[in-house]
Image (spheres, helix red, strand yellow):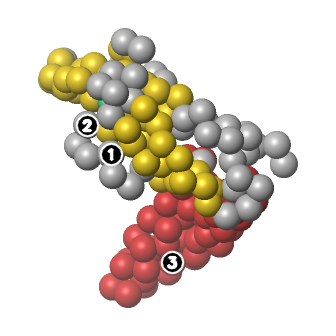
Amino acid sequence: MGWIREYPRVQVRHLHNARPKFGEWELTISVTPIAVRRPARGVKQATVVCRACGAELGVRVHSAMSTRVTKLLLLLLGIVATPATVALSLIMVETDNGGAIAGAWVSLFLALGGFIGCYFVDGVRLPKGGALHRLAYQRRQGQDHG
Ligand SMILES: [Zn+2]
C-alpha cells in the first residue's frame, strides 16, 4: 500500500483574494508545501512558514500507519453504506415508508462521506490557520502565485 507518501500530499493554501467570475469564485492563492516527514508513529507537531505572508502555522502530521487506518475505515464505511443505501432505496420505492426515506438519505451521505473522505484524507491537520489559511488538497484550484 504505497498510497501514503512519506511527505504530505496536501499543501497549505493562503487565500489572497476571492472574487466571483462567471458564476464561480476565482481564487487567488499561494500554496506552501508541507515539508514535514511523517513520524514513524503517532502525531508530529511542526511549523510551516507560509510563503505568502510569513505566518508560522502549526500543523499536525499523522504517521502513515494511522493515516492508512483512517483511510481504510472511511473506505469501509463507504463500502458498508452503499448496499444499505440501495436496500433502503428499494424499500422506499416499494413501500413509501418515511423511515426508509430518511434512512436512505443518511446511508447515502455516509457512503459518499466515506468514499470522498477516503480519497482526501492525508493525515494532516491545520488547527489554527485562521480565515486565510486552509489545506489545499489539489493544485488546480486557482492561480498559483507561489
Ligand atoms: Zn499566509
Q: Which residue is mark 2?
A: 132
Q: Nearer the viewer, residue 1 or 134?
A: 134
Nearer the viewer's eye, disc 3 or disc 1?
1
- Count up the numbered dots: 3
Distance CA(mark 2)–CA(mark 3) = 42 Å
The picture quadrant where one finds residue 142 is top left
The picture quadrant where one finds residue 57 is top left
Q: Nearer the viewer, residue 97 or 135?
A: 135
Q: Is residue 52 above or below residue 126?
A: above
Q: Is mark 3 within 8 Å of ligand 1?
A: no
Q: Which residue is mark 1?
A: 129
Distance CA(mark 1)–CA(mark 2) = 7 Å
Circle 1: is it few (<14), some (14-19), or many (20+) Cα within 10 Å? some
- Labelled pair 1, 2 in contact (Cβ < 8 Å): yes
Q: Which x, y percent locates residue 22?
A: 18, 18
Question: Which numbered marker is on residue 8?
Answer: none
Amino acid found under the numbered disc labelled 2: Leu
- Tell me the element at label 1: loop
Circle 3: is it few (<14), some (14-19), or many (20+) Cα within 10 Å? many
Q: Which residue is mark 3?
A: 88
Q: Is mark 2 within 8 Å of ligand 1?
A: yes
